[in-house]
Image (cartoon, grey):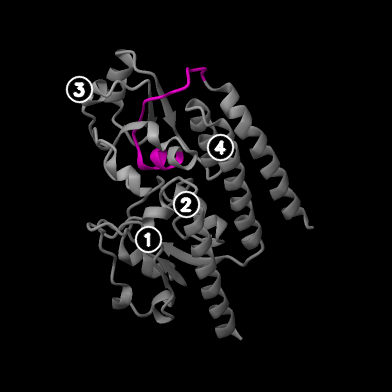
């Protein structure tokens, strides 16, 4: 076992400990029986640990599992219907710190509704939040199992690709305006797991807008175009117009399922593993071309 492998195992052990301490240090609240979950990833986490049946309200786009589609909608990322929220009489709201309207949440807090927040900053935080929300809803044991399973799976993916040679790649988060990922963004962290070298990683902001000329100059060997399976899935850039880009010349495109990859849940690991495998296959093709 080399030093890097040992380091990964130490990190995994410390993360397992931090998942437990995260829940222990959280505010003590009565076990929730009527929950409003204000983001699709929160809904998924609750269903994963068996708490889906106590969700009484959620926001748009909460579509997994299938039963989630039957939950009453009380708003979206821009606005919540305060009257509907209060009518549902929740004993806990789980909100998304960066994905819900802060003014509406402040009003609800002022009215005495208990609110806790989802705020995953790194991939491992998914395990922390699964355990935390499971504890709040009386499914602590199920949460512990799910969080440990997540950490184990994530560690396995990291170990599989940790020694792979980096490959220069462009991540097309959005086509119009052309937007990519950078810095500490969720998708940037995923690229690092797959050993993709992002030429725009040091840009200003986590989701910088760029232009086609910058991509041409970056000469990516692979282009990743996440695509939603929703009916209103966004269009992607037709890069065939620029055949000199290595990724275009070698037909090195990957189109992962954005509904899974971008959602901060256990399912994201399934798509991450698939994406890393596809990237590795393309990496191997370039190695053969260089021989």
What's the distance in space between the residues labelled 2 and 3, CA to CA?
33 Å
Residue 42, given in percent of the width and then of the height, sits at: 41, 38
Magenta stretch: give its range.
Answer: 27-45
The residue labelled by disc 4 is 142
Choose top left, top right, bottom left or bottom right for residue 173: bottom left
Q: Earlier in the sequence, mark 2 or mark 4?
A: 4
- Within 10 Å of disc 1 (Cα), the crowding (few <14, some 14-19, many 20+) is many
User: Residue at (32%, 47%) from the top-left corner?
Assistant: 63
Q: Earlier in the sequence, mark 2 or mark 3?
A: 3
The residue labelled by disc 1 is 226
Q: Is residue 43 highlighted in magenta?
A: yes
Residue 225 can be seen, yes or no? yes
The residue labelled by disc 2 is 267
- Within 10 Å of disc 4 (Cα), the crowding (few <14, some 14-19, many 20+) is some
What's the distance in space between the residues labelled 1 and 2, CA to CA?
15 Å
Q: Quadrant of the N terminus?
A: bottom right
The residue labelled by disc 3 is 83
Q: Earlier in the sequence, mark 3 or mark 4?
A: 3
What's the distance in space between the residues labelled 4 and 1, CA to CA?
31 Å
Circle on res. 270: none
- Contact (Cβ within 8 Å) of mark 1 with mark 2: no
Residue 220 can be seen, yes or no? no
Residue 190, given in percent of the width and then of the height, sits at: 50, 54
Residue placed most toward the observer, 26 or 141: 141
User: Residue at (57%, 27%) from the top-left corner?
Assistant: 23
Q: Earlier in the sequence, mark 1 or mark 3?
A: 3
User: Residue at (54%, 79%) from the top-left corner?
Assistant: 286
124 displayed left or right of 102: right
**Of labels 2 and 4, the one closer to you:** 4
Up-down relation of residue 50 to residue 211 (above or below): above
Residue located farthest toward the right when viewing the structure as drawn: 1
What's the distance in space between the residues labelled 2 and 4, CA to CA?
16 Å
């Amino acid at each position: 076992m080399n030093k890097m492998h040992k380091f990964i195992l130490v990190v995994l052990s410390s993360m397992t400990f931090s998942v437990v301490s995260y829940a222990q240090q959280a505010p003590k609240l009565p076990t929730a029986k009527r929950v409003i979950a204000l983001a699709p990833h929160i809904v998924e986490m609750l269903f994963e640990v068996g708490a889906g049946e106590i969700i009484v309200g959620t926001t748009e786009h909460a579509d997994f599992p299938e039963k989630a589609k039957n939950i009453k909608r009380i708003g979206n990322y821009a606005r919540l219907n305060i009257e509907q929220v209060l009518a549902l009489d929740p004993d806990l709201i789980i909100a998304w710190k960066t994905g819900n309207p802060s003014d509406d949440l402040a009003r609800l807090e002022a009215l005495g509704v208990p609110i806790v927040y989802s705020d995953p900053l790194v991939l491992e935080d998914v395990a922390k939040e699964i355990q935390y929300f499971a504890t709040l809803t009386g499914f602590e044991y199920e949460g512990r199992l799910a969080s440990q399973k997540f950490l184990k799976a994530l560690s396995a993916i990291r170990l599989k690709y940790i020694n792979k040679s980096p490959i220069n790649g462009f991540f097309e988060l959005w086509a119009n305006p052309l937007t990519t990922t950078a810095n500490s963004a969720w998708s940037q962290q995923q690229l690092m797991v797959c050993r993709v070298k992002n030429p725009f990683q040091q840009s200003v902001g986590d989701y910088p807008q760029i232009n086609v000329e910058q991509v041409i100059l970056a000469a990516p060997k692979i282009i990743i175009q996440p695509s939603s399976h929703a009916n209103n899935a966004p269009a992607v850039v037709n890069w065939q117009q620029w055949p000199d880009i290595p990724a275009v010349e070698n037909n090195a495109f990957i189109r992962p399922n954005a509904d899974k990859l971008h959602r901060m849940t256990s399912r994201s690991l399934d798509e991450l593993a698939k994406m890393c495998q596809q990237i590795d296959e393309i990496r191997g093709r370039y190695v053969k071309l260089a021989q």
